Image (tube, rainbow, N blue to C red):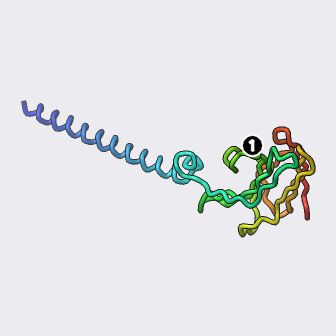
Amino acid sequence: MVEEPRRRSSRARRFAIVALWVLAGGLTLTFGTSLFLHYSKLALFLGGGCNEQIVSEIPSPDGKLKAVLYVRDCGATTRASTRLNVIRKAASPPGEASAEVIAGYEFPWNATTHKIGAQWTGDHYLDVWYTDDVELTHLNNQVGSVHVHLELRR
């Protein structure tokens, strides 16, 4: 009869240990998820966001499309990037953007880009130039029906 109280205390002790491990695991999971969402790009889609500043809009000769040159800045943990998209004339940039024509990092960037530029040469032909000190992340020479001619300027 003396051993039975020990078994009860042993069960209570095991329950307390398991409960502490479950609590510690839950707190670790919560903290880890919070850090992941804070420092990952997934946080941008779950409530964060990026600031997009339009540098210029260049309408196509037929007026149906426009090339939008803008800078996207997603905060302190990422660098601001300069991007060029082709979108419908009525679309509000850069929301309904097509695939990017070009994207890259300029050094230094001071709100006016002079290292990436574009000019329409026809209704569906766009000339895009960039300088050799732009760190490119995307280059596309066809965006929908628009043929893009890319030119490196030194």
Q: Splitting the image into 4 quarters, where does residue 143 fall? A: top right
- Whether 56 is drawn above or below 96: the answer is below
Q: What residue is rendered at 92% in x and 47% in y?
A: 122
The answer to whether residue 27 is left or right of residue 137 is left
Quarter of the picture holding the C terminus:
bottom right
- What residue is at 91 percent from the left and 62 percent from the top? 153
* Location of mark 1 (residue): 98
Residue 34 located left or right of residue 147: left
Q: Residue at x 82, y 52 (%)?
A: 59
Query: Observer-nearest residue: 108 or 100?
Result: 100
- The spot of residue 118 in percent (x, y) is 85, 56
Residue 85 at least partly seen: yes
Where does residue 98 sit, x and y in percent of width and height? 75, 43
- Please identify the quarter of the rendering in which residue 11 is found: top left
Give the left or right position of residue 141, taking residue 109 as reference. right
Residue placed most toward the observer, 78 or 71: 71
Residue placed farthest to the left in the image?
1
Q: Position of residue 103 (x, y in %)?
A: 76, 53
In front: 76, or 61? 61
The count of marks equals 1
Apparent side of residue 35 relative to residue 149 in the rendered image (left or right) = left
Q: Secondary structure at mark 1?
A: loop
Residue placed most toward the observer, 52 or 87:
87
The x and y percentages for residue 52 are: 66, 57
Q: Residue at x 91, y 49 (%)?
A: 149
Quadrant where the N terminus sits is: top left
- The amino acid beneath tag 1 is Ser
Pointer 1 local density, CA inside 10 Å: few below 14, some 14–19, many at least 20? some
| Above or below for 34 versus 18 | below
Q: Does residue 103 appear anywhere in the picture?
A: no
